[in-house]
Amino acid sequence: MRESVVVGNWKMHKTIAESIRLVTELKGLLSGKRDTVTVVAPPFTALNSVSIALQNSHLKLAAQNVHQAAQGAYTGEISASMLLDAGCSYVILGHSERRLYFAETNDTVNKKLRLALDEGLAPIMCIGERQEERDAGRTEEVLTIQLTEGLKGLRVQNLAPLIVAYEPVWAIGTGKNATPELAQEAHATIRKHLGDMFGSVFANGLRILYGGSVNAENIPGYVDLPDLDGVLVGGASLNSESFAKIVTSFD
Ligand code: PGA
């Protein structure tokens, strides 16, 4: 049995005070024993305050990015050890907004993944096709290239913490969520390709999340899909009630 994982990606939203308010509400709404791993990814500035606010709760903390070098003269960047120091246990890597606006490539994602795994941060690796790639029938090809290049040179024995998030670019922030059938098809493709790369034991244990316009209304369609192990939520994670409803759908 794979554990379900629900991640809230707050993107560039929330001040420190707003962040503390949101996680305090979430702690209340999600108190008690839960089987679903629940992760929030606030902006860098709020990470440490949120980490303190989350003490004595089962909620986990993620960063939205990390630099690929362990340390050095990289003005404006944040290292894995700084994220660990701030209380993070996960990091989102290769989100399509990072690929689109900050020139991240599969190669950058590969370097960041290696560093995150070396330093003990669990990577949430985002992949997904653009609309024109889907229209051209290239979805499978795009996903397999992103996986092959992003995970190049990594050894299966180091990959246990890895989580993959399938996030079709056309579904992110658009209100146009992928249908459950389409998500299942992509997730099965991802699991199969990773089975070819790293063996079936690894692939069968890997958590694969769906992301793209997930909300409290459409979540019931996803929870029972055989190859879907959770969701990565953007907009709907900014509200405690909708995010808590998404989390509890997996319990
Ligand atoms: P969305 O974002 O839920 O607002 O579509 C998802 C994401 O970017 O991870």
Image: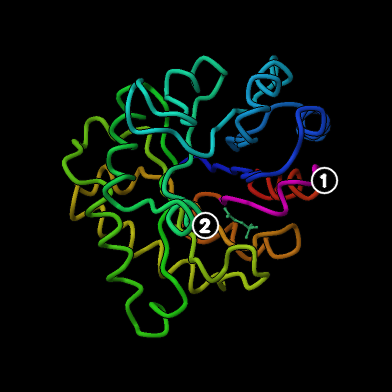
Indicate which quadrant contains ligand 1.
bottom right
Q: Earlier in the sequence, mark 2 or mark 1?
A: 2
- Which quadrant of the structure image shows residue 116? top left
Distance Cα–Cα, label 2 vs label 1: 20 Å
Residue receiving disc 2: 210
* Quadrant in which the C terminus is drawn: top right
Crowding at label 2, few (<14), some or many (≥20) Cα neighbours within 10 Å?
Answer: many
Whether 177 is among the magenta residues is no
Residue 251 in the image: above or below residue 97: above
Residue 105 in the image: above or below residue 55: below
- State the SS at label 1: helix
Residue 4 in the image, given as x and y percentages of width and height: 54, 43
Residue 92 in the image: above or below residue 171: above
Task: Specify start and end residues of the magenta stretch as a single range.
Answer: 231-240
* Quadrant in which the N terminus is drawn: top left
Q: Is 194 on the left-hand or right-hand side of 55?
A: left
Residue 133 in the image, given as x and y percentages of width and height: 38, 77
Q: Is 248 on the left-hand or right-hand side of 67?
A: right
Residue receiving disc 1: 241
Three-letter residue code for mark 2: Tyr
Return the mark for residue 168: none
Whether 238 is among the magenta residues is yes
At horizontal 64% and vertical 63% (from top left) the residue drawn is 173
